[in-house]
Image: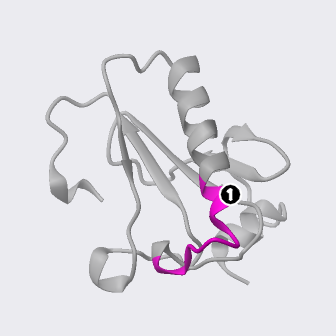
Amino acid sequence: MCVFCKIIAGEIPSKKAYEDDDVLAIYDINPQAPVHIVFMPKTHRMTCADDVNGDNAEIIGKIFVAIAKVAKELGLSDGYRVINNCGAAAGQTVPHIHFHLLAGKDGMSESMI
């Protein structure tokens, strides 16, 4: 079981930023910006963006709806970034598709995640 599946199952504690039936968002334990939240589907259907297809794409839309909701709630009207690392060469360390919301740092560099 991957670390995100353990967090979703409640086996590893986390600070939740958002949760519904399909999506969990947690504050990153090693933040790369003043606001750094990780959004993930609650089911381990995909490893990374390479696995998205017509049968499972609906959950990606739900994740982005959650991202927009949290960004509005946090007042991130100045802007934010959403990042998905796909594969080890891109810096992905957890093989469970997820998206990083980063904000609060002017000029966030490309190498932040």
Q: Looking at the image, which residue is at 56% across and 69% down? A: 97
Secondary element under disc 1, as helix, strand or loop, is helix
What is the count of numbered marks?
A: 1
Q: Quadrant of the C terminus?
A: bottom left
Residue 98 x/y as whole percent: 54, 62
Relative to residue 56, is residue 108 depicted above or below? above
Of 89 and 3, which appears nearest the observer? 89
Q: Is 56 included in the stretch rendered in magenta?
A: yes
Over which residues does the magenta segment extend?
50-60
Q: Is residue 104 magenta?
A: no
| Quarter of the figure with residue 4 | bottom right
Residue on which disc 1 sits: 58
Where the N terminus falls, by quadrant?
bottom right
Q: How is the image coloured?
A: one colour
- Graded by Cα atoms within 10 Å as few (under 14), some (14 to 19) or many (20 or more), the crowding at tag 1 reads few
Q: Is residue 32 left or right of residue 4?
A: left
Rendered position, 95 above or below 77: below
Image coordinates of residue 105 in percent, x first then y, are 24, 31
52 up-or-down from 8: above or below:
below
28 left or right of 92?
A: right
Observer-nearest of 11 and 65: 65
Pinpoint residue 60: horizontal percent, then vertical percent: 60, 56
Determine the residue positioned at 31% across, 27% down: 104
Amino acid type assigned to the residue bearing label 1 in the image: Glu
Residue at left offset 19%, top offset 41%: 108
Q: Percent x, y for residue 49?
A: 47, 72
Q: Nearer the viewer, residue 60 or 31?
A: 60
Residue at 36%, 84% in the rendered image: 88
